Image (cartoon, rainbow, N blue to C red):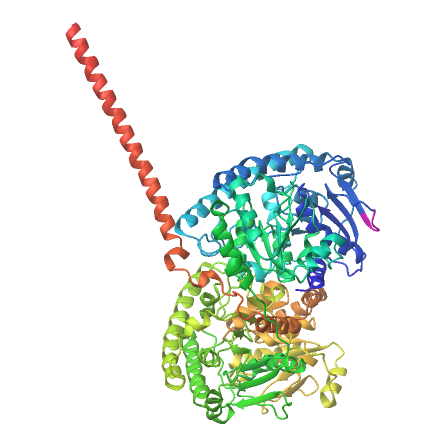
């Protein structure tokens, strides 16, 4: 991915935390780790911030050699030569745990004291220097968080690696040893039983240890400053974490939206190589293998027999070798160029470099991916095991264990596997979009996305109920409209948990009907017989999976698209964790703060909806077999969906924990507002106190609203000074035409001031145009949306049974309060503040799948057995260990008692004899 994209992401994210709308910010960066490879990443990020005009103060061990404008260094090393962290080549679980148990608290506490002892830092805190933001490294000490607290500044965390064990609970990321990549140890997303036990134990041990490290740091900080919360608590208040990884390497990871993947931004434009090195690589007819084991590892400490095996292999291979090595190599090897230092990024960018033999440090790994160079990984310590496993699983290279190095195995890895890896690119795509749902509100969203794909030159075949009247030449409609009616203004008012089973059952019934309409359509059948070649299939993810069977017949990679949030039955297929205590359930209220009753309801309804969807899917499978022939189970096809474009955003819906292949794209359907005309324009312009817009969407018949609710609305219209615009189908209703404008269709996005049913499209439009909402949820996802509207601060919600003349007027007055509207304006600014627009995001990831169809997008959790997901086998091991310990303890105590009984008897007999 382009380096500038990552830099834009990192820079723009900062704006989310700032109150004032200004161009330049005062930013404090605190980077307490003394490892050069870490700061090498941060340095690029910091210089880009400075280049964009922000004023930086940077606390680190690595001051700039040449002073930069608006960049001030606080040098923790004070010009002294730094101790370089070097590790001999050794692979040991015990060593890894020992380094955490000893080095982490010692080095972290030492660094914390150095920072707090610094006179410039003390002066900065004493004078309460104003910073808009603190960028804090998240590694071996949390001391920077205390500094941010003392300066009263929000914090953005930053890393140069993947998540560390203590980051998982800190940012609410679920950890499971059965499928999640784990720093320090082998196994990738497919660990063995032993590896899962080791991971489970080490995860608990390291987090237990981290709590004690935090307490130790708290005591260090309290020695300097009073009334500072614990660093553990401050860690949970970090706004964003810029995580140095990427979907291409790490696969689909389950992360909340405030953990942002930005891996790769350190990679600079390649520079000209030194003349002798340039000639050496240019003249290599069979390509070049680059070998480097990084800056931290001592390459010369590799065992002699392993070193000999590497030499024998590179001597036999026809490729030349460029080797970063800290000792002289044998003189008789003529195909090797070696040096203690080499410009790694520039070498990897050379087209003649065909492979990279590496320890799998994050920087080198990222550079290899960027330049398309396959990797042979030999991990030794730290996150190298994670990176090597990710490289192999993602098809970017292979790995070899340090302890298994041999000439034969190295030759096999190089010849058979590494040189076989290739990359595929495409420009103009042939895309089929399968959209079987007949709801217009969904297609309104999807149509904008499809039109943008057209505008970018792709060829589209669209199977839907909404054919274009004048389609362009690269748009081919397969219309389903002949055999269906549009799902619009067709539902009666319902607001009852008792009626929920009927509503959900009907929704899936409509799905099965859509399946029949889709597969039986003659144009669809003709399309199947033609066997067209598609680069990509876009399939609606709503109430039927029949579109997946059709995509399978077309043999195209699948991108899922949703015009709403994630339906309950989609969680498992994408590996999204569901928990009723904090994850909203789409069809009921409660938001992220449910009551006990609401949590109980969610648990029951979640199980119920999954069950009836499973039953419905089995019936659909029969239809698929009837019309399409031999097709795998639909749920198995669903697990191979590459990406899901979901229509939500954390600004409105809150922070959800999604894998990397679920992309939030909410908002792209909202165009620029057009000026209203005619009577409506005159009505709005005549509204001295503004306009409130009332609409209950396109699905519910507003004429079916209960009389008491209609009466309350009419009372509010009379009681409020504002004028009202009401989307209303009952023309017989007698209302004051000077106070209310009635129509059965209105240009919603042009006149928003909203009393709404809480539909997602309307909520997004209101947020886009900074208009508060009074949400009156009726059915479907509206209760969940209404809860999000209230929790985000976009508006308030009112339930049907709460509506009276007085409560409705009071609720409208609340959202019209100037302070409330000001909060909505701030929320809207955050909504618009994105590094890439929603539409560009959707298009980018769609094209990404077509460019990289064989990349592993699938989250490992969807494949692991039930007992592994819940770690039942590991739990059994723990229980067995505890029971064994208890039994041994009982045996020991019993033997101890027997021993004392025997001794007492002997003592008694002895006394008896003496007497």
Q: Position of residue 489 (x, y in %)?
A: 53, 86
Q: Is residue 612 above or below residue 485?
A: above
Magenta range is 67-71
- Out of 323 and 575, give the one closest to the viewer: 323
Q: Is residue 385 left or right of residue 364?
A: left
Q: Position of residue 284 (x, y in %)?
A: 66, 59
Q: Residue at x 43, y 78 (%)?
A: 508
Which quadrant is home to the N terminus? bottom right
Q: Is residue 635 left or right of residue 679?
A: left
Count of marks overlaid on the render? 0
Please say whether residue 158 is visible from this viewpoint: yes
Q: Is residue 446 left or right of residue 404?
A: right
Q: Position of residue 617 (x, y in %)?
A: 39, 76
| Residue 741: quadrant of the picture | bottom right
Residue most toward the front? 332
| Residue 742: quadrant of the picture | bottom right
Q: Position of residue 424 (x, y in %)?
A: 59, 70
Per the picture, the main secondary structure of the magenta-coloured stretch is: loop
Please say whether residue 181 is visible from this viewpoint: no
Residue most toward the top? 915
Q: Is residue 235 magenta?
A: no
Which quadrant is home to the C terminus? top left
Q: Is residue 911 above or below residue 721?
A: above
- Out of 723 and 309, give the one closest to the viewer: 309
Q: Is residue 432 above or below residue 141?
A: below
């Amino acid at each position: 991915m382009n380096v500038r994209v990552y830099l834009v992401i990192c820079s723009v994210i900062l704006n989310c935390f700032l109150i004032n709308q200004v161009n330049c910010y005062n930013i404090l960066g605190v980077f307490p780790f003394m490892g050069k490879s870490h700061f090498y990443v941060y340095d690029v990020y910091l210089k880009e911030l400075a280049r964009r005009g922000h004023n930086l103060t940077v606390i680190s061990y690595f001051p700039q050699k040449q002073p930069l404008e608006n960049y001030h260094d606080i040098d923790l090393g004070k010009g002294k030569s730094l101790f370089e962290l070097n590790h001999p080549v050794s692979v040991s679980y015990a060593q890894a745990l020992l380094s955490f148990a000893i080095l982490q608290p010692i080095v972290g506490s030492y660094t914390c004291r150095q920072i707090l002892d610094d006179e410039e830092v003390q002066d900065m805190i004493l004078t309460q220097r104003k910073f808009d933001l603190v960028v804090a490294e998240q590694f071996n000490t949390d001391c920077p968080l205390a500094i941010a607290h003392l300066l009263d500044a929000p914090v953005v965390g930053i890393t140069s690696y993947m998540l560390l064990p203590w980051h998982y609970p800190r940012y609410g990321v679920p950890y499971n040893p059965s499928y999640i990549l784990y720093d320090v140890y082998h196994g990738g997303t497919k660990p063995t039983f032993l590896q899962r036990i080791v991971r489970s134990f080490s995860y608990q041990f390291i987090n237990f240890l981290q709590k004690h490290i935090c307490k130790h740091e708290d005591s260090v900080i309290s020695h300097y400053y009073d009334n500072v919360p614990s660093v553990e608590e401050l860690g949970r208040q970090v706004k964003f974490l810029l995580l140095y990884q990427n979907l291409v390497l790490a696969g689909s990871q389950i992360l909340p939206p405030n953990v942002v993947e930005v891996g790769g931004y350190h990679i600079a434009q390649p520079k000209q190589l030194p003349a002798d090195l340039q000639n050496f690589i240019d003249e290599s007819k069979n390509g070049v293998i680059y070998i480097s084991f990084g800056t931290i590892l001592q390459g010369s400490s590799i065992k002699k027999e392993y070193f000999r095996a590497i030499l024998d292999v590179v001597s036999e291979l026809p490729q030349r070798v460029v080797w970063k090595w800290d000792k002289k190599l044998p003189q008789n090897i003529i195909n090797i160029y070696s040096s203690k230092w080499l410009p790694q990024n520039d070498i990897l960018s050379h087209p003649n470099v065909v492979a990279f033999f590496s320890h799998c440090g994050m920087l080198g790994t990222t550079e290899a991916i960027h330049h398309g160079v396959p990797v042979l990984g030999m991990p030794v310590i730290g996150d190298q095991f994670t990176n090597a496993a990710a490289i192999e699983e993602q098809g970017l290279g292979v790995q070899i264990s340090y302890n298994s190095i041999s000439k034969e195995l190295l030759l096999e890895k190089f010849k058979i596997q590494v040189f076989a890896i290739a990359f595929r690119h495409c420009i103009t795509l042939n895309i089929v979009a399968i959209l079987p749902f007949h709801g217009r509100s969904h297609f309104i969203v999807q149509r904008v996305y499809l039109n943008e794909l057209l505008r970018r030159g792709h060829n589209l075949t669209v199977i839907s109920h909404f054919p274009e009247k004048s389609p362009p030449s690269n748009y081919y409609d397969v219309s389903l409209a002949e055999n269906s009616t549009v799902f619009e203004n067709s539902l009666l008012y319902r607001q009852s948990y008792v009626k929920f089973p009927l509503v959900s059952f009907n929704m899936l019934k409509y799905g099965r009907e859509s399946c029949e309409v889709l597969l039986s359509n003659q144009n669809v059948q003709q399309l199947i017989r033609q066997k067209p070649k598609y680069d990509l299939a876009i399939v609606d993810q709503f109430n039927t999976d029949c579109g997946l069977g059709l995509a399978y017949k077309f043999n195209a990679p699948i991108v899922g698209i949703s015009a709403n949030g994630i339906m309950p039955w989609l969680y498992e297929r994408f590996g999204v964790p569901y928990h009723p205590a904090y994850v909203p359930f789409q069809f009921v209220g409660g938001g992220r703060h449910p009551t006990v009753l609401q949590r109980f309801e969610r648990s029951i309804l979640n199980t119920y909806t999954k069950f009836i969807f499973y039953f419905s899917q089995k019936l659909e499978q029969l239809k698929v077999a009837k019309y399409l022939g031999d097709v795998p189970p639909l749920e198995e096809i669903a697990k191979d969906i590459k990406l899901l474009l979901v229509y939500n955003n954390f600004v409105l819906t809150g922070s959800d924990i999604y894998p990397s292949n679920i992309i939030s794209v909410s908002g792209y359907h909202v165009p620029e507002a057009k000026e209203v005309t005619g009577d409506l324009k005159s009505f709005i312009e005549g509204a001295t106190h503004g306009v409130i817009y009332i609409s209950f969407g396109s699905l519910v018949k507003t004429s079916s609203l209960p009389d008491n609710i209609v009466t309350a609305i009419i009372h509010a219209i009379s009681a409020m000074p504002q004028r009202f615009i009401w989307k209303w189908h009952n023309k017989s209703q007698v209302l004051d035409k000077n106070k209310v404008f009635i129509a059965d269709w209105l240009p919603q996005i042009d006149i928003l001031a909203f009393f709404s049913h809480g539909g997602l499209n309307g909520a997004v439009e209101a947020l886009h145009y900074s208009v508060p909402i009074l949400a009156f949820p009726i059915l479907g996802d509206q209760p969940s949306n209404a809860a999000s509207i209230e929790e985000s601060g976009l508006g308030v919600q009112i339930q049907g049974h709460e509506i009276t003349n007085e409560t409705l007027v009071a609720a409208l007055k609340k959202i019209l309060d100037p302070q409330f509207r000001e909060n909505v304006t701030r929320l809207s600014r955050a909504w618009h503040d994105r590094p890439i627009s929603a539409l560009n995001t959707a298009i980018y990831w769609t094209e990404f799948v077509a460019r990289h169809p064989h990349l592993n997008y699938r989250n490992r959790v969807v494949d692991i057995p039930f007992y592994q997901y819940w770690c039942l086998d590991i739990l059994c091991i723990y229980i067995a260990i505890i029971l064994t310990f208890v039994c041994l303890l009982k045996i020991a105590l019993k033997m101890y008692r027997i021993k004392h009984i025997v001794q007492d008897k002997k003592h008694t007999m002895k006394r008896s004899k003496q007497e």
